[in-house]
Image (cartoon, helix red, strand yellow):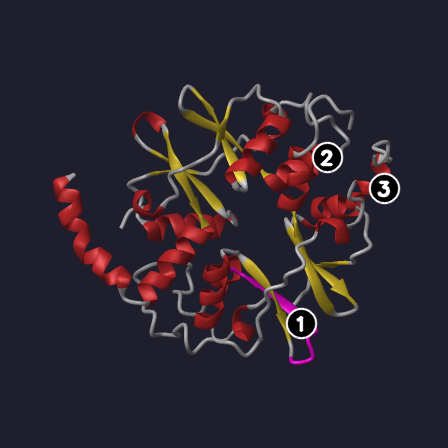
Amino acid sequence: MSVGRIATRVVATAGRAESVLDVARRMDEMNVGCVVVVEDGEPVGIVTDRDIVTRVVSKELDVAETSVSDVMTAQLRMVDESTPIEQAVATMSDAGARRLVITGPESRLVGILSIDDVMELLVEEAQGIGKVLREAAPRFSASA
Amino acid sequence: MIAESHENASTAPSTVRDVMERKVVAVSPSASVRELVDLLRRHGISGVPVVDEDGHAVGTVSVTDLLWRGQWFAPDGAALPDADPDARGLDEASVRDVMTPDVFGVGPDATLAELVEFFASTGLGRAVVLEGRTPVGIVSAADLLELIADRPRGAAG
């Protein structure tokens, strides 16, 4: 099974020049812990709630005057949506990463694979649902 | 008429107690991993403190622990979903087997500045609020984000 099938596809995004304040509001409204910073549809950075607290608030920067590009992590761990889940989990484990950015054709943002998504799969697997999904997978990809 | 000229300082949250989530979801070290996973899913959370029968925090456990320390995975980490879940199943493994035996705690009277410093220095985004050894709340970076998001536009930091 590929990461594209279990990644979270509704992702909060932001432009580089947006203020941290606007992004914090978006995260709060959408109840998400991170936003992906995109430029022309391509992911160029990621900002988590923790980043905002530790990189902006702790340095007493003004959240309204600080732009997202100043606090984002620009070194993204990205994998293509066709990557097998096993490989993505190994990447997360090796890198100590809790999230991977999932991309599609032309490196466009598709979604985020969080460690919670993988957990969901583990549970389904343990409950036998994973087996059913796996068996159904070829049928889905053939018709896609 | 009630006077509206109250000082911000008297209402603005200033300590961990003011912003923490008071409903603490916790798990026993003897619970099975399946019970833990069900608990996390039911509450939509990623981690919980582990408490003993006296209600004292003895560790924390999160989905990160489960994925990276779960003994039903192949040792090389390249595990899901081909690893045999029966090798050490969700029912056989207990919370004790996978938890981190440290409690990353802050006191309820710590200031928000101290909390920010705690997150910055530990690399964590969530902490158990402890009174003695008893968890009385959970506080996360998201709780602080909420304060930032609620800030009126143009207000000075």
Q: Quadrant of the C terminus of chain A?
A: top left
- Please report the residue visible at 65 percent of the width from the left and 45 percent of the height from the top: B143
Amino acid found under the numbered disc labelled 3: Ser
Report the chain holding disc 2: A
**Label 2 neighbour load within 10 Å: few <14, some 14-19, many 20+:** many
B85 with respect to A37 (left or right):
left
Residue B86 within the magenta-colored segment of the rendering: no
Give the Cα distance between marks 3 and 1.
35 Å
Most common SS among magenta residues: strand
Residue that mark 1 sits on: B58
**Label 3 neighbour load within 10 Å: few <14, some 14-19, many 20+:** few
Residue that mark 2 sits on: A57
What range is drawn magenta here?
B53-62
Residue B57 within the magenta-colored segment of the rendering: yes
Labels 2 & 1 near each other (Cβ < 8 A): no
Residue A128 placement: quadrant: bottom left
**Label 1 neighbour load within 10 Å: few <14, some 14-19, many 20+:** some
Residue that mark 3 sits on: B10
Give the Cα distance between marks 2 and 1.
31 Å
Residue A57 placement: quadrant: top right
Mark 1 or mark 3, which is nearer the start of the sequence?
Answer: 3
Report the chain holding disc 3: B
